[in-house]
Image: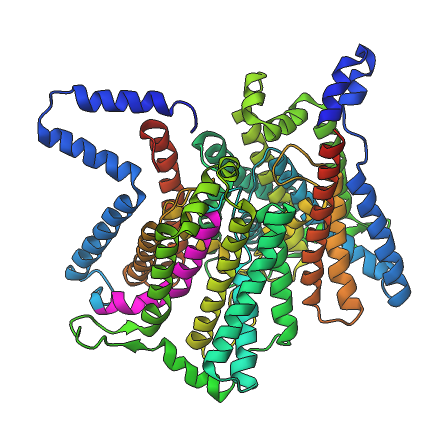
Amino acid sequence: MSAETTGMKSQKFDVKARILPPLVTGQEYALIGVLVLLWILLGIFTPAFLTAGSIQPLLGNVAPIALIGVGMTFVIITAGIDISVGAGIMVSAVVSAQLMVSFDIPLALVIPAAVGVGLGLGLINGLLVAYGGVHAIIITFGTLNLFQYLGLRIFGSQTVNGIPPTLEVFGNGAGGRIWGIPVSFAVAVVFILASWWFLRNTAWGRSFYAIGGNQNAARLAGIPVQTRVLSAYVVTGGLVGLGSLMVVAQGTNSLMQNVGQGRELAIIAAVVIGGTSIMGGRGSVLGTVLGAILVQTVVTGVTQLGWPSQLGNLFVGLFIIISVGADILRDKARSKSA
Amino acid sequence: MSTPSTQTIKTVSSKHAGNSRSPIVRGLTRFGVTLLTQRAALLSILLVGLIITMTVMDALDMLSGPYDAKYLASSTIALVGLAMLALAQLIVIVSGRGGIDLSVGSMVSLSGVFFGYTYGMWGWDLWTAFIATMVIGAVLGAINGILIAYVGFPPLIMTLATFYAYRSLALVFSDQKPINSPVIQEFYSAARAVQIPGLEFIPPIPLGVITFLIPTAIFVWILMNKTVFGRRLYAIGTNDVAALWTGIDVKATRMWAFTLSGIISSLVAIYTVAQFASARPDAGTSGSGMALPAITIAVLGGVAITGGIGRVGGVIIAGLLIVWLNAGILLAIPGNVGAQTPLLALGLVLIGSSLLNAATRKRFGGI
């Protein structure tokens, strides 16, 4: 922060360059290093890891976490949080599954339906958080329960069976790949690049950082805080809708009631491992993607090494502690040198 | 939320002092303000309203079973673990700086597995295993507390990390199988319903309410209201810089808050073992886990997420309200829908009460 303000004094033409954060931050370099190291180690110890048959589903499974993680990054940068995304996945997953089963609608209609449902849920969250004057964690705890109720009612029975292969383009099968790249991952990458540019280079994107840094200062600087906060939750909702289609596509042809359960914590873990500060005002989507890949690599690696699969979560926990701990230490070093 | 409080207090007080309305109107106004500003009062009214509504519905034969004292007493079995963990959240959230403990469910699972092994498999006697489990809970909580208070981890993140780590350890140690043995199956008697001797007019109450919940609630109440530690906790939650300047060891106090949360979680673990007659490694983490409902009850009970505000009474009444509301819904709405409606009720009550809170805090001050 302090480095950015001193940049204001310098000549006009390099102000923009100084105010903008670096393209890739220290945390992201560290994450890339850890990922390369892990992939090399896993490649050495498990011959099956560095094969297309293992990497393709890994990237496919990363896609919904990274995609929704983009929205979660926006929300957390504004110093908010959205605990309800797991329940949101459930609602839009069951709506799209029921539509496909009952009406056999084509892909071109399933996508807008799911995204529309997600946007609606995000709008509820956004309105309550932006205009209610209550902390986001409480609001989204509440909407989590409401969405779960809504989803269970739409489920009707225990499962939705006989889902047609309409969504195979987002799945982990052969129909979900173009030139060997999982389509779901490619879609996620497009959104990541767009939102990376959006957060870094547009006034709207920068205002998220300003709101997260100091909401009152942002308001006094003329930022329409409430609309901007609302937009972050609506975007998250839309991405939840899109991501839920990937979740459905990657599952079997019947949808269980526990779909999406616990995903909210995995998504928050990816965002936090990626170096986004839970206090708001700092973070990037690039880190979130790296965090999501790291989490999925650990989960896949543990299984392929033949270790108990539940050990994966232990490493996820340790990675959260290490990456946030590194961030805290860097922050202390920064404030000491300033 | 912050600055206009002095101004609103002035307008409120002048309205009260300067009016010439009758004492009845003034009394009603004061009653209304109390209802809006005192969470425990509002929840008590809701609780009474709920019981009256359900009793009337019962009398009109609209329920599938009797909603009477016996039913209410037996449904408190759902209250034990929920309310104890909500009290743990009370301690942690009051300590401020975004205090929250997402890892309570995982601590329940992990210390439950430990209790299952020591008491059920290794033949430790009950009290040794009991104390040892509490020590394990304290250690698990202290790991959270030390990293949060002394290193500076945000509580949400730290306890998210240990939520994963402890849950994983519980499943790995137990090989993903519930721990079961004759000793543990006998321990089920600790969760049975009992008649209190001498008070036969009270229907049988689940033993856990008497042996676990009430002692914990009394302990936390004394701790928060009658001890130096409790006052320090409220002080650091209200303003930890000011607390530091008054000479309070802010870091140690915060660390102990999380340690206490671990200890209470281990007590819930022991109770859960009795309730299920086996030590399940996913006892606190199956489904959406125990942490989210516990936090919800705490917030509903008037614990301010910003720290420094929250009372034991409010949390217990909130727990009773939710448990008895759910019990009523199960009778009023048959089948699947009845099992799902509590989610709707919980969500609406939580959002409604917190929005009301925010609005009244602006208008009248107080919680």
Depth check, front residue: A218 or B250: B250
The scheme the figure's colours follow is: rainbow
Is residue A45 at least partly visible in the picture? Answer: yes
User: Which image quadrant for residue B166?
Assistant: bottom right
Q: Is residue B74 magenta?
A: yes
Where residue B127 sits: x, y (%)?
46, 79
Q: Is residue B308 magenta?
A: no
The main secondary structure of the magenta stretch is helix
Residue that appears at 58% across and 62% down: B140
Where residue B133 sits: x, y (%)?
52, 72
Is residue A161 at least partly visible in the picture? Answer: no
Where residue B16 sits: x, y (%)?
19, 24
- Residue range in magenta is B70-93
In the rendered image of this protein, does residue A164 appear above or below residue B96? below
In the rendered image of this protein, does residue B126 appear above or below residue B147? below
Where residue B207 sits: x, y (%)?
33, 74
